[in-house]
Image: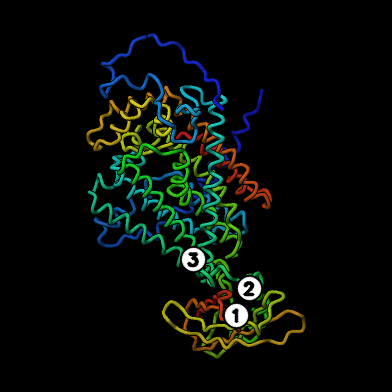
Amino acid sequence: MTPDVKTKPTSDLRDVLEEYGTLTRDALQDYLPKLEPQRYLYDLIADYPARGGKMLRPSLCLATASVFGASAEDAVLAAVSIELLHNALLVHDDIQDESDERRGEPTLHAQWGVPLAINAGDALGFFSLRPLLENSLRLGSRMTLRILAEADRMAQESAEGQALELGWQHDNRGDLADADYMEMVLKKTCWLTTIYPLRMGALIGTRRARYDLDPLLRFGFYLGTAFQIQDDVLNLLGDARYGKEIGGDILEGKRTLILLHLMRESSTTEHEDILRFLGKPRDERTILEVEHIRAAMGERGSIEYAQAVARGMADAAHEAFDDAFGHASDSRDRRFIEALIDYVIEREL
Amino acid sequence: MAAKRQKKPDSARTQPNRKSSLYGVPTWIGGRRSRAASNGENNGNGEPTSGGAGDASSGGAAASVRNVIDSCKKILDDQVERGRKAASAQGGAFGSLSDQAERMIRAVSDAVIDVSTMWIDYIGSVTQAGDWFPRRDAQDGGQPTVQISPAGAATVDLKLAADTELETLRFQPLMDSDGNVWDTGIQAVAAPSDDTWFRLVVRASQPEGRYHGAVLDETSGEVRGTLSVEVKRT
């Protein structure tokens, strides 16, 4: 009988996610105080972090820092900062996307209204700077400034990516190429999800402000893009564990790789029909229409195509991993980072 | 090059079902649109060449996937270039430091770390004096800690990493979060070996706190690192 070679790495991967996730969540509590106005602010900012999540971003930061020589204590505040900012953007994303569910529960704005939710998201974003500043005691002022510069770059790229996605919806763009999608994902998803945690971990681990971070940019891009494409696929095929509305991306008019493929593979008439659907106000789009488009994505091979691209990205990530981490000796954290490549495209939630 | 497509099974329905369309036209099942594909996958006749239904594993789809991956290289190159421009714009902050300066930064950082290794010797000497003893607070995970008594001042000797000359450095006064300034009176220490040592003077009246100070290049004024010390009163 052929041994299941994936059993052990997957188990290790989940162990590391659990360990670093717990470490980050515990440290995160210091930045979610029980102050007044508790009901209108501090209860709200504590909501999303308490809902769980994979803790992929902080774990990637902590593991990278470890591979490059840092202790978990050196990097945990950076991990906390990433998680705070991630939750801040989730709150705002949910408002922009008019989403109803997050991690299986009503979104913050669905519970509290848009104004209070925006304010809570703002606060989470502002508070995400605190752990970075407090970590200056360990890392020194120079490295702290270097990390803040990295945060500034990440913020700019993320905002530009979000602007692209929302702008394409606003203008009802139907002329986008896959390369446009890749660039948008690089900015919107990869910088915060993979590139920034990787690069910050390397800076903390090496303590060298001028360490060459370009190999980590490349690895983070391929890893993050594979992650995003699988997220797009799960939005169409996932089950209740996924935590968001199935087909929500279609309903929101998101220009996913899958939608771009479908539009490319459609007749002119079909293409116009899809654009007409996407150009409607959201509340005029029907579930029946969403289901129709979802079925067409299956028939036209659009989902398979996206999965094939995700696999290609994962292959490229394996190559980029060798460039970024080839010098590092074998360790649990190094194996964890490498195992993430296959995990992100095989995950079911 | 256009690849041969896989053929879907014949549909049970041979006529368009107009009633099934949500948009008033027969849609989703039918011919491809005739305009040029926007993904650069045009076969010259306005037809896209990428795979259709169920053919994601076919040669055409594989080529399409390869094209997408290849297109990412330019995106990444642009990103790398953007980062280099940003680093250059930051100038003296990070971009223009020489390798020598980078080593200096690490050297100063090492000096802080060396404090931890110094404690053993220092504990031995000051414990005999009875007035002072430094200790390492495990909760702080290695942050240098000096405990002082009201009896008087003391000194702590720190070692710089190899190949570092104290004369090229300028230590700014250390400051804590409350604004207390600690002019450490750093001075060179004669050492029997080739190692470079410097001495930190701790006054008895020094307020408790975590102190940080920049270490600059004596000539250019560029920041070379940070010295961080915690003082606790017994």
Q: Is residue A62 above or below residue A180?
A: below
- The residues tagged by marks 3 and 1 sit, at their Cα atoms, a distance apart of 24 Å
Residue at image mark 2: B101
The image position of residue A158, as x and y in percent, is 42, 52
Is residue B29 left or right of A72 when viewed as pictured? Answer: left
Report the chain holding disc 2. Answer: B
Residue at 61 percent across and 72 percent down: it is: B105
Residue at image mark 1: B217
SS assignment at label 2: helix
Q: Is residue A42 above or below residue B120?
A: above
Contact between labelled residues 2 and 1, with CB atoms less than 8 Å apart: yes
Q: Furthest-bottom residue in view?
A: B152
Identity, as a three-letter code, of the amino acid under mark 2: Ala
- The residues tagged by marks 1 and 2 sit, at their Cα atoms, a distance apart of 9 Å
The image position of residue A245, as x and y in percent, is 33, 35
* Residue A122 at least partly seen: yes
Identity, as a three-letter code, of the amino acid under mark 1: Asp
Q: Is residue A304 above or below residue A40?
A: above
Residue at image mark 3: A135
- Quadrant of the snapshot with the N terminus of chain B: top right
Contact between labelled residues 1 and 3, with CB atoms less than 8 Å apart: no
Is residue B189 left or right of A80 when viewed as pictured? Answer: right
